[in-house]
Image (cartoon, rainbow, N blue to C red):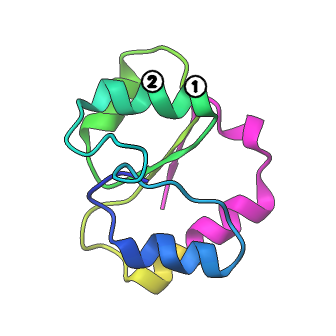
Amino acid sequence: MDEHVANAVAAGLRRRGIDVLTTTEAGLRGAPDAEIMAQSHAAGRVIVTSDPDFLELHGAGGEHAGIAYYQQRSRTIGQLVSALVLIYEVLEPGDMVSRVEFL
């Protein structure tokens, strides 16, 4: 989960039993987006973000574990949690590889 995402989103997902790792917890706070993308790919973790730079990285090609993207201030925390839970329940991890899901 990107550092721009509210901690309450991670907390809401954890309350629903979903394994979440924030950028800060991974020791990547302030790291370049390309490094965050590479680390999340290596760990098989989808990036949840509102940072459009990740869309540019996606567009540049290369494989990644997936991106769940939303426009900043476009959703409440509850709406984000609900959308992410739906993705978690409906898609298999492999379904997200090199894919962007717009929330």
Q: Residue at x 26, y 48 (%)?
A: 51
Mark drawn on residue 89: none
Of 47 and 10, nearer the camera is 10
Badge 2, how many Cα within 10 Å: few under 14, some, many 20+? some
Q: CA distance from mark 1 to mark 2?
A: 6 Å
Quadrant in the rendering for residue 22: bottom left
Quadrant in the rendering for residue 73: bottom left
With respect to residue 61, does 49 lie above or below? below
Q: Secondary structure at mark 1?
A: helix
Q: Position of residue 56 (x, y in %)?
A: 29, 29
Specify whether 60 is left or right of 42.
left
With respect to residue 23, does 71 lie above or below? below
Q: Residue at x 48, y 70 (%)?
A: 10
Quadrant where the image shows the N terminus: bottom left
Q: Position of residue 7 (x, y in %)?
A: 37, 72
Q: Amino acid at mark 2?
A: Ala
With respect to residue 80, does 100 lie above or below? above
Q: Position of residue 87 (x, y in %)?
A: 67, 60
Of 82 and 25, nearer the camera is 25
Q: Residue at x 28, y 32 (%)?
A: 33
Start-end of magenta stretch? 83-103
Marker count (numbered): 2
Location of mark 2 (residue): 38
Q: Position of residue 103 (x, y in %)?
A: 48, 62
| 21 falls in the magenta region | no
Q: Amino acid at mark 1?
A: Ala
| 93 falls in the magenta region | yes
Q: Secondary structure at mark 2?
A: helix
Label pair 1/2, CB-CB below 8 angstroms: yes
Of 46 and 29, nearer the camera is 29
Location of mark 1 (residue): 42
